Amino acid sequence: MIRILILGSAAGGGLPQWNCACVNCVAARSGKIDPQTQSSIAISGDSEEFQNSWLINASPDLPRQLESTARLQPRRNASRNTPVAGVLSTNADIDHALGLLLLRQQEKPLLVYAADETRAALAWLDRTLARFCGIEWRKISSDFQRLTGSIAFRAIELPQSVAFQFRDEASGRLALVAPAVSDLTRDLSKASAGNDVILFDGTFWNDDELAAVRPGARSAREMNHLPIRGGSLDFLRRSPARRKIYTHINNTNPILMPGSPERAELEQAGIEVARDGLEILL
Ligand SMILES: [Zn+2]
Ligand SMILES: [Zn+2]
């Protein structure tokens, strides 16, 4: 069995974002919709205790996310310990990497699986952490390698990031976790076949969404996020996966508002919207 737990479902900035007064951020501040923390996912095997959990990306909200999840808190049988085994990085974005810095109190070096490009872009963080626990970098591969228990994983290289696919060696079940997708490449399309669950980049609904709140802002595609409309929606609609879930959702995205036409379109397409604390078992 594979347990996937959404620790944070928001894109960089979170919901609400400290300097944003868009419709969704205002609604989150007034309690009309639930706040969401920045993108991170915990994955573990079948042990009920969540021992050896791996994180996919480490957001600036990580200490709070771990503290609010009982299974990810330290055990009481030793003064310093953690069930967090390490981190799988999709890319070097601040909202995916800053959490590594916040794990600096770790006793042993932090284990981080990442592409060479991500490692190079995070050299500053590597240098800073060298004075604390340090990082032990591990290579990713397009072939499956063992992660923990019966879970194997592999990386699917994308133009500016990677997606990860997990396989339960006992059941053969597959999960695709792709929170940062700039393009539907051939490899990604191929990898998306046969998954039970797909977690996909839901940062923006429209390509020009951010310009509405910040004139002159870069487009979704320029920020390496394929928008939902005209981008990933048809792809996910056609996918036979049992569960299809958008995550890494920017606070400007209209799918966050229950009752919006955009949310209704997803519901009709059988696609879910992630939220903090959502757990998926496969
Ligand atoms: Zn991000
Ligand atoms: Zn906002």
Image (cartoon, rainbow, N blue to C red):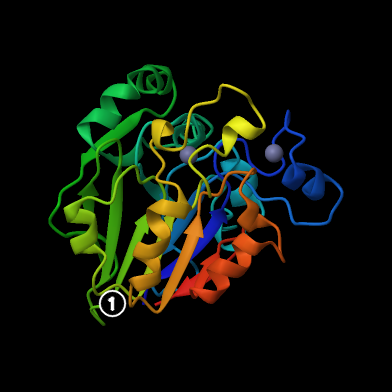
Vertical arrangement, residue 170 with respect to residue 141, above or below: below
Q: Quadrant of residue 43?
A: bottom left
The picture quadrant where one finds residue 122 is top left
Q: Position of residue 108 (x, y in %)?
A: 38, 37
Q: Residue at x 29, y 31 (%)?
A: 118
SS at mark 1 in the image: loop
Residue lying farthest bottom?
171
At x 82%, y 45%, the residue is 29
**In the figure, 119 relative to 280: above or below?**
above
Image quadrant of residue 167?
bottom left
Q: Residue at x 72, y 50 (%)?
A: 35
Q: Quadrant of the C terminus?
A: bottom left
Q: Quadrant of the N terminus?
A: bottom left
Residue at numbered disc 1? 173
Q: Amino acid at mark 1?
A: Arg
In the drawing, does residue 264 fall left or right of residue 232?
Answer: right
Q: Nearer the viewer, residue 183 or 93?
A: 183
Q: Nearer the viewer, residue 224 or 274?
A: 224
